[in-house]
């Protein structure tokens, strides 16, 4: 059975030696001393490895069952969820006034990576609740916050997001779910929603659904959509649970992966709901949850790649197959281990260099969220808004590809269910689809985010990269060659693509949109290149100071050199594709496909 070991040392390296969190001018970061964060990460890692990970295969094989209108989660899930709740993990970064621990978002991200890698399906129950609670926190009235948040922060009640309907997914303006106003200020919600993760289950007393619906008489399309709080059970004035609301599960979807999470069809039959935020401004409110979820989904891409890599590495070290072309490395055995072969090394280095770079990228992005939420920094908010589709799209595309590479290392055994690699591939696949398919993320990046606020956020990103290069170039010939020059070249490719969009996109919008997917990946590679240049700088500094664990830092440098030499040059390929324009993409008439 696959195993998982929490990468606490690597998380600590990024937090303290790369991001240097205690030195950041962000409220609350001064308390994040290494001993403090290490205690949190070690405890979370223990729960992830010992409690959650052993249930991952159980969830995949057993799945969820619908019995008399109630979804039964896989064996062991409820007990594990109780342990997670008892430890206060769901409210780690939520406000103290609602029962949270008020820690920075970056710590929640570090813990979330471990939980997601250990058990993707189980972690989704609390992850969606966190997003729903954040939305109520941002847009709810004081009464709504006091009613719903204490129980949601603790995960005594869980939460969901309800957007998609059978006939509309990305184009939510087509939705038909209605919200009829009532004399007491509530609404009656009627309609059907599909693909609702954690929509019904047996691990919480109540489930608080955030539902998009249209109030009759409102504007057409997306401008007429509002957001509502619709609980499974109504809540009495004294806070106790009342009667069952008019919401029920129609069926559980049969899916390729994440079998341990109950993905439901939800039926609303005159269910009582309350407006969250303003009338007809539902998408504005829901984007609070969606943007948080998109960063969380990017984390899922990293997490599945990490756990798949750990198991592929163990297999490559243990499995004996063939001899190294340079001579036997295991002369006393019948064959050498797989890890001696260059192509196996290539796949392992692809995985290792991605997961470590992506981890730094996610944690850096999380500091931008903290800088905005805790410090009111609008520039940080603009930058993370720009980077969100890159985090979601690039990390999940790469994460899936690298779970496949991990599976490939097993050969035929990777295709056999008992080895567990198939589950990582199947579970990772959904991350490219939900919370906005990755093609939509690319369109959002090029069509909206680049031009947002006059393009100042993308220019700020370019300035950030240029400043790093300027400040760190010329100090060491090897560092310049291995890190600074590749980053400079990749950044120039990204800027050239942006200039192409500006010049050609106005003439023919298809020129920009046909290159949007390549641009998203190019942007992702530059971000990871920047992270690797920063990690290499930190590793060099540690070695110069005589670090006791020199092997850790030497390994970090070698891994970074691999990414810069073998992965980052993909920006040139993406630029060539972008500059070919829309003609090769749009050449065929629809009938000729």
Image: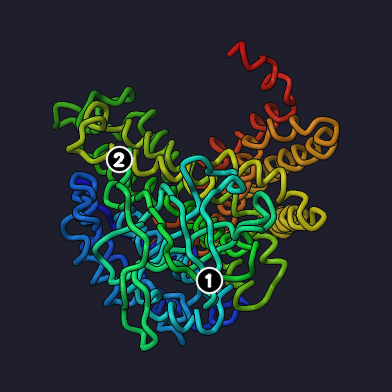
Residue 441 placement (x, y as % from top left): 60, 45
Residue 135 placement (x, y as % from top left): 53, 69
Crowding at mark 2 (Cα within 10 Å: few <14, some 14-19, many 20+): few
Please name the residue shown 25% across and 24% down the image: 323
State which mark lies toward you, 2 or 1: 1
Separation (CA) of disc 2 from disc 1: 37 Å
310 or 231: nearer the viewer: 231
366 or 15: nearer the viewer: 366
Please name the residue shown 50% across and 75% down the image: 104
Residue 41 visible to an observer of this rendering: yes
Q: Which mark is residue 182?
A: 1
Residue 319 placement (x, y as % from top left): 20, 34
Residue 514 placement (x, y as % from top left): 68, 30
Residue 482 visible to an observer of this rendering: no
- Say what secondary structure mark 2 lies in: loop
Quarter of the image with the C terminus is: top right
Q: Which mark is residue 254?
A: 2
Are the residues flagged by discs 2 and 1 in contact, CB closer than 8 Å?
no
Among the two numbered marks 2 and 1 on one chain, the one whose residue lies closer to the N terminus: 1
222 or 348: nearer the viewer: 222
- Say what secondary structure mark 1 lies in: loop
Crowding at mark 1 (Cα within 10 Å: few <14, some 14-19, many 20+): few
Question: 283 above or below 340?
Answer: below
Please name the residue shown 54% across and 75% down the image: 183
């Amino acid at each position: 059975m696959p195993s998982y070991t929490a990468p606490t040392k690597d998380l600590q390296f990024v937090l303290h030696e790369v991001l240097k969190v205690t030195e950041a001018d962000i409220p609350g970061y001064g308390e994040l001393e290494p001993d403090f964060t290490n205690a949190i990460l070690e405890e979370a890692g223990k729960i992830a490895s010992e409690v959650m990970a052993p249930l991952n295969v159980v969830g995949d094989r057993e799945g969820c069952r619908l019995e008399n209108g109630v979804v039964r989660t896989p064996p062991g899930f409820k007990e594990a969820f109780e342990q997670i709740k008892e430890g206060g993990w769901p409210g780690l970064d939520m406000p103290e006034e609602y029962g949270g621990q008020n820690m920075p978002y970056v710590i929640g991200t570090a813990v979330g990576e471990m939980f997601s890698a250990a058990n993707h399906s189980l972690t989704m129950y609390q992850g969606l609740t966190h997003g729903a609670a954040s939305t109520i926190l941002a847009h709810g009235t004081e009464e709504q916050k006091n009613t719903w948040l204490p129980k949601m922060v603790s995960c005594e009640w869980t939460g969901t997001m309800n957007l998609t309907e059978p006939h509309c997914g990305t184009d939510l303006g087509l939705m038909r779910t209605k919200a009829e106003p009532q004399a007491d200020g509530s609404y009656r919600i009627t309609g059907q929603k599909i693909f609702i993760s954690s929509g019904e289950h047996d691990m919480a007393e109540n489930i608080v659904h955030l539902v998009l619906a249209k109030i009759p008489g409102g504007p057409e399309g997306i401008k007429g959509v509002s957001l509502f709080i619709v609980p499974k059970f109504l809540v009495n004035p004294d806070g106790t649970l009342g009667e069952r609301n008019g919401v029920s599960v129609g069926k559980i979807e049969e899916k390729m992966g994440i079998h341990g999470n109950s993905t439901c069809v939800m039926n609303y039959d005159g269910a009582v709901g309350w407006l969250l935020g303003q009338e007809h401004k539902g998408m504005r409110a829901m984007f609070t949850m969606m943007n948080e979820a998109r960063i969380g989904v990017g984390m899922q891409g990293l997490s599945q790649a990490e756990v798949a890599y750990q198991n592929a590495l163990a297999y490559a070290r243990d499995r004996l197959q063939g001899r190294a072309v340079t001579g036997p490395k295991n002369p006393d055995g019948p064959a050498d281990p797989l890890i001696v072969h260059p192509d196996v090394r290539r796949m392992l280095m692809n995985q290792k260099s991605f997961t470590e770079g992506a981890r730094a990228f996610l944690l850096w992005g999380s500091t931008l969220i903290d800088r905005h939420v805790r410090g009111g920094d609008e520039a940080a908010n603009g930058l993370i808004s720009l980077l969100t589709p890159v985090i979601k799209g690039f990390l999940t595309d790469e994460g899936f590809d690298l779970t496949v590479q991990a599976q490939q290392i097993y050969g035929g055994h990777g295709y056999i269910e008992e080895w567990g690699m198939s589950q990582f591939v199947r579970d990772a696949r959904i991350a490219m689809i939900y919370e906005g398919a990755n093609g939509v993320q690319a369109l959002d990046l090029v069509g909206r985010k680049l031009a947002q606020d006059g393009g100042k956020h993308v220019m700020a990103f370019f300035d950030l990269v240029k400043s790093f290069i300027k400040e760190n170039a010329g100090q060491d010939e090897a560092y310049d060659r291995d890190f600074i020059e590749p980053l400079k070249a990749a950044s120039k490719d990204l800027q050239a693509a942006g200039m192409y969009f500006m010049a050609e996109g106005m003439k023919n919008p298809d020129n920009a949109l046909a290159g949007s997917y390549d641009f998203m990946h190019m942007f992702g590679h530059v971000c990871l290149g920047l992270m690797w240049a920063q990690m290499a700088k930190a590793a060099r500094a540690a070695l110069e100071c005589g670090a006791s664990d020199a092997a850790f830092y030497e390994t970090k440098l070698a891994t970074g050199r691999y990414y810069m030499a073998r992965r980052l040059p993909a920006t040139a390929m993406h630029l060539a594709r972008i500059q070919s324009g829309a003609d090769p993409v749009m050449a065929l008439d629809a009938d000729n496909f």
